[in-house]
Amino acid sequence: MIVKMKHLDIVCIAAGREEALERLRSLGAVHLDLGGAAGAGVARARGEIEAAERAVHMIRSARAEYAKISGAKEKPETRMRKVGEVLELAADRAELLSAVEALDREIKEFDPYGDFDPALAKKLIDRGVDFGEALPARLPEMRLSAMRERRESLLNRANVAAAKMACTDENAVLAKHPELRERMEFEQARELMTERGAVCAVSGWLPAPEAESFKAAAREAGWGFLLREPADGETPPTLIEPPKPFMPMKALFRGLGIAPAYTESDVSVPFMCYFSLFFAMLVGDGGYGAIFLAATLALRRKLPRSWFVLLTVFSFSTIAWGFVSDTWFGAHLFLKAQETRELVPRWPWAGALVGPALWLGDVSYHNMMLLCFTIGVSHLMLARVWNGVCRLPDSTAVAEFGWAGVLLFMYLVTNFIVGIFTGIPQWAYWVFGASLVCVFGFTVKPSQLKTRGAELGMLPLNIMSALGDIISYVRLFAVGLASVKVAENFNAMATGLVAGADAVWFKALMSVAMVAVLVVGHGLNLAMAALSILVHAVRLNTLEFSNHKGVSWAGYAFRPFKRSI
């Protein structure tokens, strides 16, 4: 559900401006458009944040550099330093290293001429001594040995500066970061409060359920206020409130940086259900799901609760898919492949346990593609039927139900094209014909033909693109199969190393190499699987499904002005 918003105007006494902002921040219920403020106070606060972020970057870079210089593997003992001290050390070190680079160029230029005294050489030249090519055309300021000594001194000083930064506690700097950001937000809010004589005013957005509690707080503070519905052309922020089991989706949307527009739908429930399924199929291996689960449990105390719940659900989904497909680190635990590539149970009792895996593992992969197309059409038809139900009793709901019929027909066509179905049933043509009548007849109302009539001309292209939308879901099969095949090939490479070893010592050596190949190979495959989730699982939800649902993700998230620390 997308929470209804009220536009809010607040008026208070100008002398009590700061107190009003503190009360408003403590209330933590009003969204202010802080991005519109850019005065001197905001710039100063933003500069402090950027300085702190630069300081942390400098500390971490210096720590890595110091580890190379000293060879120390453990983190050095840290001490407290101010941001200004760190930036000053970084500037000094940069200046010293620049001087070292200049000396390196000088040393390279004069090294062929040896360690001569430039002062003595100048005196002899002034007296008319001709050295020919024995001396350079330009004399250096100091001897070559002095250059090298100075270079060593400057480099030592730069290393000392790096050591001091490496020994700085960056956590102490990071601890002040929320405080600095909160200060900047306060400065932004103060600039947004426009003064008009003895009073000042600020506008924002308030969730409708918070209206009564805000009114009570406003009366207690002595504010004047006006609450109204959003006007035409205004774009309120989006606050989604999914059902409790699906609340972690808010964290995923924040992580992806997306939000539906205020006038659109909250798709958290289908997004989480289908995303979990896509996650499992794209990873395609129950063993990898077990690794995800182990990592999630290990980081339980460090992960926010929402992310812990999400990753646990995704991990269990992947493990469940491992049982359905009988795929564990690229190997089959309960099935074995015959020469015909057909999978059969390893033991008589395994057939009942892995029946779905036998169905999915057919030689032609038709069943797996059928599953992907079925998931796709269910996903897209859900969007259209949902639209139709929401639009009832408006006549445009008929067009949405018609689109569901079009998708069903395209699903049958897709399966026929790839050879899964041998033909298209007769009833499907009647469904398709009736669906076309609904789509063309009810997408645009007669009264809107002048303004939206051009949309009817695009309908044939949109109907044909529905076929491509369903076919797009075959990526679940293709990417998941690629992950499994990569795992299988790494397994074959690893076991091949040991299979060719005869001597005991050689077999032991090859066993170590086998473990290395397995760790590196599966680690790489796991990383590629994680990347495929970001690309394909997100796309199928935010593009194919959202296009049919009418979600543009053009909104901006509701962020109340409140204390964060």
Image (tube, rainbow, N blue to C red):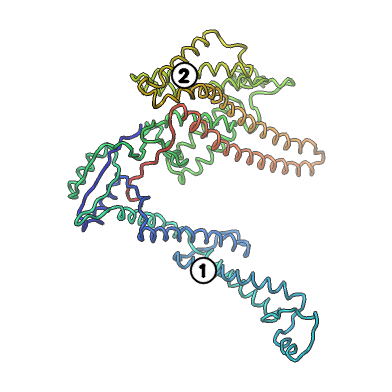
From the viewer's perspective, is 453 left or right of 329? left
Residue 522, image x and y in percent? 64, 38
Residue 133, image x and y in percent? 80, 79
Tell which tag, 1 or 2, sits nearer the viewer. Answer: 2
Residue 247, image x and y in percent? 39, 35
Numbered badge on residue 291: none
Q: Which residue is mark 2?
A: 404
Q: Residues within 10 Å of mark 2 (few under 14, many from 20)?
A: many
Q: Is residue 30 above or below residue 67?
A: above
Residue occupying image coordinates x 42% and y 16% = 441
Residue 232, image x and y in percent? 31, 36
From the viewer's perspective, is 251 left or right of 285? left
Q: Quadrant of residue 238?
A: top left
For badge 1, the amino acid type reads: Leu
Residue occupying image coordinates x 33% and y 39% = 234
Q: Is residue 369 above or below residue 424?
A: below
Q: 219 or 69, which lies in front?
A: 219
Q: Quadrant of the N terminus?
A: top left
Q: Residues within 10 Å of mark 1 (few under 14, many from 20)?
A: many
Q: Quadrant of residue 245?
A: top left
* Label 1 – label 2 distance at C-alpha: 65 Å
> What is the residue that sits farthest to the right in this orientation?
502
Q: Quadrant of residue 344?
A: top right
For badge 2, the amino acid type reads: Ala
Q: Secondary structure at mark 2?
A: helix
Q: Is residue 99 above or below residue 248?
A: below
Query: Which is more N-terminal, label 2 or label 1?
Result: 1
Q: Which residue is mark 1?
A: 89
Q: Is residue 45 above or below residue 451?
A: below
From the viewer's perspective, is 335 left or right of 132? left
Residue occupying image coordinates x 69% and y 74% = 106
From the viewer's perspective, is 510 left or right of 307? right
